[in-house]
């Protein structure tokens, strides 16, 4: 692996003065890290080189999120549909997730970041699960920011898994079907205590959700950033946070700008 892909990024704090004045800071940011393959191919590189270039982008973006005061960041690293890619690319992505976790967990720990994982165990490499568990245990007491890696994650799979878990409880007579509510349902998702997503960012120019955080994005604001993921960084994140600051969220309520109705 080329050394430039694993270069260190300035830790949070060093760039603190540069965070722009933000009208509001989203509590939970979801990021679809897309565009690696196109970025690489446009430079005559293989798709895997694009994924490798995404490591520094991820670390710099996380540092920028800490600096901006974002408390929860969830990134899409591998979808339940990404198994459709070539065996070589799947193999690369599994090994790469494992290596990034191993390489970066101490750095994330020193930043006060708590690492978590959302996804299905089935098919996921055991070495990836064990690195996720090691990082989770190491960082369990950190409170600066929750960082969740969605690996072998699908929004539909997550909802189906929650439904299965509730159905099993109902079949065992522990709950009644009538008692199931949005609140009790969300307690069976991968992150039972996670807040809804406030801002969903997708890099790489595509404007779709691709099965990410379907439940949690019910009222999310969307930012479709044309930058390919390897070119994303803390400044790009702050630009998207500025856009979020200008959005008016209504959650279904009416906002009357003229007195009377
Ligand atoms: C996102 O980049 C990374 C993963 C899906 C793992 P892509 O590999 O999808 O890159 P593009 O969209 O083909 O450019
Ligand atoms: C979404 O990107 C999944 C990840 C970024 C991990 P894809 O590249 O897989 O999505 P589609 O296929 O373009 O919708
Ligand atoms: Mg893609």
Image: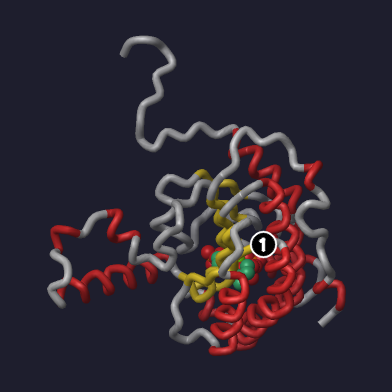
Residue drawn 45% across the image and 53% down it:
195
Picture quarter with the N terminus: bottom right
Q: Which residue is mark 1?
A: 112
Report the side of 137 relative to 35 (left or right): left
Numbered disc 1: secondary structure = loop
Measuring from the top left, give residue 188's x and y in whole percent: 33, 66
- Coloring applied to the structure: secondary structure
Residue drawn 59% across the image and 55% down it:
202
Report the side of 71 relative to 7 (left or right): left
Measuring from the top left, give residue 103's x and y in whole percent: 73, 78
State ligand 2's quadrant.
Answer: bottom right
Residue ranking furthest to the top: 259
Please name whichever residue, 17 or 159, is drawn nearer the observer in this view of the structure. 17
Q: Classify 136 as above or below 10.
A: below
Residue ranking furthest to the front: 141
Report the side of 209 relative to 226 (left or right): left
Please name whichever residue, 6 or 43, is drawn nearer the observer in this view of the structure. 6
Measuring from the top left, give residue 106's x and y in whole percent: 72, 73
Task: Please identify the quarter of the rendering in which residue 190 is found.
Answer: bottom left
Residue drawn 69% across the image and 49% down it:
237
Task: Please identify the quarter of the rendering in which residue 174 is found.
Answer: bottom left
**Does any atom of ligand 2 lie closer than 8 Å to the CB of label 1?**
no
């Amino acid at each position: 692996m080329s050394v430039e892909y694993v270069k260190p990024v300035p830790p949070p704090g060093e760039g603190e003065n540069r965070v722009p004045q933000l009208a509001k800071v989203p509590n939970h940011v979801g990021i679809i890290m897309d565009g690696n393959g196109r970025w690489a191919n446009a430079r005559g590189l293989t798709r895997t080189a694009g994924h490798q270039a995404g490591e520094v982008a991820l670390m710099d973006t996380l540092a920028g999120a800490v600096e901006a005061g974002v408390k929860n960041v969830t990134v899409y690293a591998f979808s339940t549909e990404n198994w459709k890619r070539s065996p070589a690319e799947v193999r690369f992505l599994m090994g790469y997730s494992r290596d990034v976790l191993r390489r970066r967990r101490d750095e994330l720990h020193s930043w006060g970041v708590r690492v978590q994982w959302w996804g299905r165990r089935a098919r996921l490499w055991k070495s990836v699960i064990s690195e996720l568990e090691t990082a989770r245990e190491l960082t369990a007491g950190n409170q600066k920011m929750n960082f969740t890696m969605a690996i072998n994650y699908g929004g539909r799979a997550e909802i189906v898994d929650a439904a299965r878990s509730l159905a099993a409880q109902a079949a065992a007579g522990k709950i009644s079907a009538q008692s199931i509510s949005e609140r009790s349902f969300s307690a069976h998702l991968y992150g039972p205590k996670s807040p809804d997503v406030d801002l969903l960012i997708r890099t790489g120019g595509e404007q779709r959700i691709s099965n990410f955080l379907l439940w949690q994005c019910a009222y999310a604001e969307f930012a479709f950033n044309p930058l390919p993921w390897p070119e994303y960084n803390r400044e790009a994140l702050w630009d998207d946070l500025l856009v979020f600051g200008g959005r008016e969220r209504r959650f279904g309520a009416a906002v009357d700008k003229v007195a009377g109705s």
